[in-house]
Amino acid sequence: MPPIAAALSAGRGDNGGSRGSGGVGVPIPPLLALPRGDGGGTPSALLQQLYTQISEGGGVKAVSFEHARRIARKMREPTYSLRHFHDDVTTTFPELRYYLLASTRGAVHGEESKLPSKRRTSLFHFKSRRKQATGAASGGSSTTSGIGAEAEYLRTIGALFALYWLARIDIDGARGFTFGVDEATWQPLERREPQTSSFQARPLNAHSTPQQKAASARPDDPQAFFFSQTVSERRETFYREHEWPRMTELMANAGLLTRHKEAAGTLGEWSVDEERMAGMLALTAVHDIMKMAPLLPTVQRQHAPYEGFGEGVCINDHDVALGYVLSHYGDALPSYAMLPEALQHTIRFCTVKMGFNHGWLVQAEAPPGPLFAKFRAAITSDPKLSKSDVAFYFVHWLTDLGGAEPSPLLGSEKLVVRFPHSVLRSFVASFSIVGELAVESETRIFETYLRSRWKELEQQLGAPPLGEEGVAMMRLVIQAQSLPLQRSIVEAWVRLDEDDRKVLAFEMALTGIAEQQFAELQGRDEFVSGPAFLVYYSPTFLRNAARTDALSGLQMLAEVYRQARSLWPGSRSQAGEAVTVRIDQIKELPPQTIMDAHAFGDAWMLEKQNRFEGVIKQQPVYSILGYGEDTELASKRLLAFWWRTDDELDDNIGTLESLRAKLVFSASEGDLVGRLVSRGASPGAPGAAAAASSSGGNRKVQLV
């Protein structure tokens, strides 16, 4: 799993780590009995029964917007401790109890029964019960996330704690966010001992190649350096080097913090906007309750269809499910119902499925269309939304990720010890740019981001590239992420074959949005074409390639784009479409390993899955030789990932050369695309006509 993907896979322990002890002493509320029957058949009836049960059982206050505002008001008071905050939110927001449901047979949904009615959990205790949490007596985990109800509760508490720390960064929040608190006193720590972390990192050096070890020792390769550090080193580095003022700025942009001018004109202390913060607390409390399978609503006749779900169908996507309840049964969630309409509107916006993948932006992985189009449509279609609402969404996104580890007293471990710090900095820096989507086009925002990132590197790499190659150069350099790898990409670009440069320049400058072009390419009709390609995992692939052989990495990437274009011929009518090409199987491999596949009788194929998806697969050559002449050939292309020299080709390469010619010319006989595939030009790109009129079928470079 690539570093960013590993970092984003919340709470699964995919990273080679293991959970240790370090009891955190977070109180777990009494179990909430799940009522028998369907509560009357409507989504609101069951929720109302649960709230009635909580109210009659005590332990929570009467739901009141004033109570929520009082919590918000105190969040920056130096004497308002984390324990006070915990006690207040757990008695103010009744939906927090919904994460721990007991079935009519006495089992916790997602956990074993026979638990005390009120208890505390430690990480050691949690580890011993985690397997039980995914196979309860009631028939397996009844959380849609599959990780167990208690974990979901702790993650929600962790998100609330992350919000608490961000509101008071300049008081004690930076320490609490980074190191967590002492489990006995709940006071923020100055540092945390390694054995009290829930995650024990396995440094990259433990099982790595000499090249990886060399790279990991270089602090100028931030991601490799991050994964070479121990957990304690990651915490210390985060606390010392994180750009804390940007976090506070984000909170201010979201309207959660304000700073007034003193009489003398100087800036005063930060204060909390009570209403906005109360809304964020409510959103955090209810955001994941639909991960509890018994709470998932069924679409009622009067609302059908809803986001693709028909009448009588259970909405099994927890985000869509929450959006449905908020839109049509909001009164059934007291923490939401108590809010003013303006805040309810903002919260509904935060639950919309916007298809925004932030990793695609910070790594310049996707063209503007698949990256921003749906997100911008959600913003611009609602005149009531503002830039502060977009920032509000990003704060929620950040705190949700910050609480993703079910260890709330250990700080925001997901962001501090699992998430590469350089990537998080890029995320936070991009929030303000993305907020401009309310008033700017997708392509303009993306170009602004590309140029802002290059400006940070201008002293090392020179002025931003211009002309038709500029967008591709900026995207490739940003995908490399760290300065030494970025320099390798720039040096390799100069040595790259002209045909490959033209392919990359053309394909990476398509926007995926009809009638939108990058500024340098305005008026160039050939760049109003599509579909555009999103090469999924290209940043991971490119970083791995740049560590050993950046030139071959760029050549391979050009080949992927080239063969993709032969499967999806370009046209102006498709300028507003995008195709995702997944390169999962090669993303972690260095170029030499990829090229060596032919020595073992294997080949790399790009296969068209459907109109909008393609995937690279490794296949034995003998299985490809049996392909028919029609439908199979039309949906597959052989990727020329092997070395060419002037020496006599070995038998395997000769077979691959012949097979590639067969696939190209049989599948596209008489078609301009087919004739261009082996020449290195993209249809519509500069030089395409010249390539089409040239003779011969093999490019005179080492890697074809």
Image: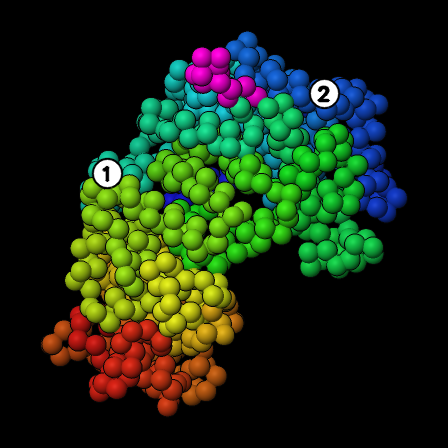
Does residue 268 belong to the magenta stretch?
Answer: yes
Residue 66, numbered circle:
2
Report the amino acid beneath label 1.
Asp
Task: Name the spot of residue 165 as percent of width and height, x first.
Answer: 50, 23
Report the amino acid beneath label 2.
Glu
Q: What stretch is highlighted in magenta?
A: 259-272
The vertical placement of 436 against 116, above or below, is: below
Q: Is residue 169 left or right of residue 26?
A: left
Q: In this view, does 358 lie to the left or right of 94?
A: left
Seen at 30% across and 53% down, the residue is 474
Task: Name the spot of residue 216 as percent of width and height, x first.
Answer: 25, 40
- Give the crowd class for mark 1: few <14, some 14-19, many >=20 residues within 10 Å: some
The vertical placement of 265 against 339, above or below, is: above
Seen at 29% across and 46% down, the residue is 454
Residue 220, numbered circle:
1
Q: Which label's residue is closer to the chain start, 2 or 1?
A: 2
Task: Name the spot of residue 69 as percent of width and height, x first.
Answer: 67, 21
Does residue 583 show up?
no
Which quadrant of the figure has residue 175? top left
| Principal secondary structure, stretch drawn in magenta | strand
Say how the picture is coloured.
rainbow
Seen at 56% across and 30% down, the residue is 255
Q: In which quarter of the image is the C terminus?
A: bottom left
Secondary structure at numbered mark 1? loop
Secondary structure at numbered mark 2? helix
Task: Name the spot of residue 97 as percent of width and height, x first.
Answer: 71, 29
Q: Is residue 669 left or right of residue 459?
A: right
Seen at 36% across and 76% down, the residue is 684
Q: Which of 592 and 334 is in front in this view?
A: 334
